[in-house]
Image (cartoon, rainbow, N blue to C red):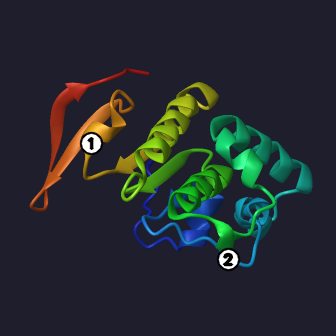
Amino acid sequence: EGQQLLGSPAHHRARMGIGYAPEDRIIFPTLSVEENLALPCEVLGLSAKEVKDRQEAVLQAVPQLKDMLQRSGAALSGGQGKMVALGRALMVGQRLVLLDEPLQGLAPVLAQQYVEAIGRLRQWQPALCVVITESNAGLLSDIPDQTWLLERGALTQASKTYFSI
């Protein structure tokens, strides 16, 4: 939308509706999953009702999180942590969500659940822009609208467009 993001601090980006799930997931181990999800919204100063509404929407997209809400961040497997990181990114990412290598290191069952959650996002928020960096694009099957390839530092658009919005 014409806004320069390069020099913008991360907390400004979150205020702009941009969520980010890093490759290494970074879950706060002393917080519950529910607290990990709510934290960025609380930092942004959202009301308790808005946090609850967003959490309910995220649980629709990522239903695997429901059974983990009271679990400590320290008690999560790596794959579960990636699911929590996705949910946390969605809590603030109302316009744009950036997912960095979300499927790396996931067991096949968890990778499938993650891909299904991304697919549900299309129904939940069709206008949401989701940018995924993934070294094995085949794992994403029919999710992307567009696929871009980054090879040896050069960005090129692949010829395949899967969906159009």
> Which quadrant holds residue 12?
bottom right
Name the amino acid type tagged 2.
Pro
Question: Which residue is painted at 31% across and 23% down in the image?
Answer: 162
Q: Is any atom of residue 4 visible in this view?
A: yes
Indicate left or right for 78 with 104 as reference: right
Question: Which residue is painted at 23% across and 42% down in the image?
Answer: 148
Indicate left or right for 86 with 104 as reference: right
Counting from the top left corner in percent of width and height, residue 85 is at: 58, 59
Mark 2 to mark 1: distance in Å?
Answer: 30 Å
> Which quadrant holds residue 101?
bottom left
Residue at which label 2 appears? 29
Please, what secondary structure does the residue beneath circle 1 have? helix
Residue at which label 1 appears? 137
The reply to whether dot 2 and dot 1 touch (C-beta < 8 Å) is no
Using a 10 Å C-alpha cutoff, classify the residue at mark 2 as few (fewer than 14 neighbours), some (14 to 19) or many (20 or more). some
> Which quadrant holds residue 10?
bottom right
Name the amino acid type tagged 1.
Ala
Using a 10 Å C-alpha cutoff, classify the residue at mark 1 as few (fewer than 14 neighbours), some (14 to 19) or many (20 or more). some
Q: Residue 152 carries which label?
A: none
Nearest the eye: 129 or 134 = 134
Q: Which of marks 2 and 1 is in front?
A: 2
In primary-sequence order, the first of circles 2 and 1 is 2
Indicate left or right for 144 with 154 as reference: right
Q: Is any atom of residue 128 visible in this view?
A: no
Please, what secondary structure does the residue beneath circle 2 have? loop
Nearest the eye: 79 or 23 = 79
Counting from the top left corner in percent of width and height, residue 24 is at: 45, 69
Q: In which quarter of the image is the C terminus?
A: top left
Question: Which residue is painted at 61% across and 61% down in the image?
Answer: 14
Question: Which residue is painted at 64% across and 57% down in the image?
Answer: 88
Counting from the top left corner in percent of width and height, residue 160 is at: 20, 27
